[in-house]
Image: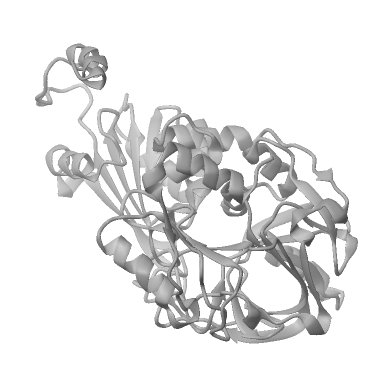
């Protein structure tokens, strides 16, 4: 059975340096946990850190735990998805392949569900009882970064999305929704004057959370997609507040049950975004909490907002872009987005056969996501995740007057702080590939076949 504990066990076994236990008391609500994470990142270290003794928002000791950096490296992503090696391309292909292997949920009795070990209902609910962090200095309050589960009452389809939630008081949250599936589902309920029941999953196997970031089709049941990505069906139980009308993950660590209220809004934010900047304060949606359930000693997973953990959590989007781009342009061999150093930059590696292909590939990629503003296209001898190689190709295989294309008046990403208009921006394509059909300097290196033959000897240390 896959849950957070099984993931941590696998991570300790395969990559023990990727995980750190912090046993001293910390006050997450006073930025202490995120400050420790910041110190690691400044040293270019990105371990998963478990805070075993965090204080709650009342600065009291609690028997719960807080975890950061579950998604911050390819090693963790590989363990989460069962990939053989922590290589970007393998992980992208693994995620996409698993996401197609949808598996129906398995219902279990509430009495046997780990998530039901502790239950708080109605007036018993007090969010200040839990270790909820303030992450970045400008944040509007303590923040949760849950996977939000909602069910379409008409179709029965389950949606899972990653949404930030700011603590307002003991039983209310300010929830931000991008105009995607959850927003569409709530809009349908609000038009009828109805509240939308939701469950905020605060801890589970990281593969469950990765599905929240994927570009899943609105026709797909995302519990079933999560079952595919996890490699086994998601076990679910009836919610405390809505019974069988909203099933919750039975093996989660923490679940908050509530409703998004119709015709009610709340001030929410600022919040540290994946771009590395604090986003603006917004008028967001209001969640009324009806119940909280948890494991004894349960762990809250917090995404380290505006840092590498936040960016790498978007890997499923990269995987979907990669597969869709390959379907359009089979010459594409690899891409790098979340691990390319720029949250709005994409690097494409391709086997170019004719001139103009790189620009077409770049434009196709930009059409797939407004997260992409700049595209650099390189040859297939360049690793798009190796920025030294990419910069070398750019500096030696392109001329600014003919290989740089500026595209004006494009739809931008609202979180891009360089935009001077709310959504209108520009884009750039750099063709850093060698020309076709004319002489070009040869890359200086030993014969490739000899290099490949030495790999085994190096690994054996002979």
Relative placement, left or right, of 197 versus 381 is right
Whether residue 219 can be seen here: no
The answer to whether 240 is drawn above or below residue 175 in the figure is above
Name the image quarter holding residue 16.
top left
Relative placement, left or right, of 22 versus 59 is left
Residue 419 in percent (x, y) is at: 37, 72
Name the image quarter holding residue 353.
top left
Residue 101 in percent (x, y) is at: 68, 33
Q: Residue at x 23, y 12 (%)?
A: 453
Whether residue 90 can be seen here: yes
Split into 4 quadrants, where in the image is the N terminus? top right
Residue 149 in percent (x, y) is at: 72, 60
Residue 284 in percent (x, y) is at: 62, 80
Q: Residue at x 48, y 48 (%)?
A: 315
Q: From the viewer's side, name the closer residue of 421 and 355.
A: 421
Q: From the viewer's side, name the closer residue of 31 and 52.
A: 52
Q: Residue at x 40, y 27 (%)?
A: 331
Q: How many marks?
A: 0
State the scheme by which the image is colored.
one colour
Split into 4 quadrants, where in the image is the C terminus? top left
Q: From the viewer's side, name the closer residue of 206 and 389.
A: 206
Relative placement, left or right, of 418 versus 262 is left
Q: From the viewer's side, name the closer residue of 298 and 292.
A: 298
The answer to whether 83 is drawn above or below residue 61 in the figure is above
Q: Residue at x 67, y 37 (%)?
A: 228
């Amino acid at each position: 059975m896959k849950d957070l504990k099984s993931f941590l066990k696998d991570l300790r076994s395969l990559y023990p340096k990727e995980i750190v236990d912090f046993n001293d008391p910390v006050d997450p609500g006073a930025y202490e946990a995120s400050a420790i994470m910041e110190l690691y990142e400044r040293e270019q270290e990105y371990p998963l850190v478990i805070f075993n003794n965090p204080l709650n928002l009342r600065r009291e000791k609690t028997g719960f735990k807080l975890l950061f950096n579950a998604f911050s490296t390819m090693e963790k992503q590989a363990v989460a998805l069962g990939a053989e090696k922590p290589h970007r391309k393998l992980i992208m292909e693994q995620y996409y392949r698993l996401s197609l292997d949808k598996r129906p949920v398995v219902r279990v009795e509430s009495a046997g569900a780990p998530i039901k070990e502790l239950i708080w209902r109605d007036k018993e609910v007090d969010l200040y009882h839990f270790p909820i962090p303030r992450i970045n200095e400008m944040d509007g309050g303590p923040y949760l970064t849950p996977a939000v589960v909602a069910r379409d009452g008409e179709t029965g389809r389950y949606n899972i999305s990653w949404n930030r939630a700011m603590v307002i008081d003991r039983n209310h949250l300010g929830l931000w929704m991008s105009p995607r599936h959850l927003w569409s589902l709530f809009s349908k309920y609000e038009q009828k004057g109805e509240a939308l029941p939701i469950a905020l999953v605060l801890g589970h196997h990281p593969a469950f959370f990765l599905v929240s970031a994927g570009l899943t089709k609105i026709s797909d049941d995302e519990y079933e997609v999560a079952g595919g990505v996890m490699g086994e069906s998601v076990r679910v139980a009836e919610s405390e507040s809505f019974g069988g009308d909203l099933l919750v993950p039975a093996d989660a660590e923490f679940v908050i049950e509530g409703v998004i209220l119709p015709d009610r809004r709340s001030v929410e934010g600022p919040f540290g975004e994946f771009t590395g900047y604090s986003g603006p304060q917004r008028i967001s949606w209001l969640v009324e909490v009806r119940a909280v359930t948890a494991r004894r000693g349960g762990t809250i997973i917090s995404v380290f907002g505006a840092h590498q953990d936040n960016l790498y959590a978007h890997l499923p989007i990269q995987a979907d872009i990669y597969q869709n781009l390959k379907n359009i342009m089979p010459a594409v061999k690899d891409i790098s987005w979340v691990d390319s150093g720029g949250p709005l930059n994409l690097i494409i590696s391709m086997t170019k056969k004719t001139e103009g292909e790189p620009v077409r590939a770049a434009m196709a990629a930009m059409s797939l996501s407004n997260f992409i503003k700049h595209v650099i296209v390189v040859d297939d001898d360049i690793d798009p995740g190796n920025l030294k190689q990419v910069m070398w190709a750019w500096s030696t295989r392109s001329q600014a007057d003919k290989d740089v294309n500026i595209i004006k008046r494009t739809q931008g990403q609202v979180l891009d702080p360089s935009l001077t208009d709310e959504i209108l921006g520009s884009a750039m394509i750099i063709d850093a590939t060698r020309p076709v059909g004319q002489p070009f300097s040869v890359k200086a290196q030993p014969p490739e076949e000899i290099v490949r033959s030495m790999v085994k000897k190096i690994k054996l240390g002979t």
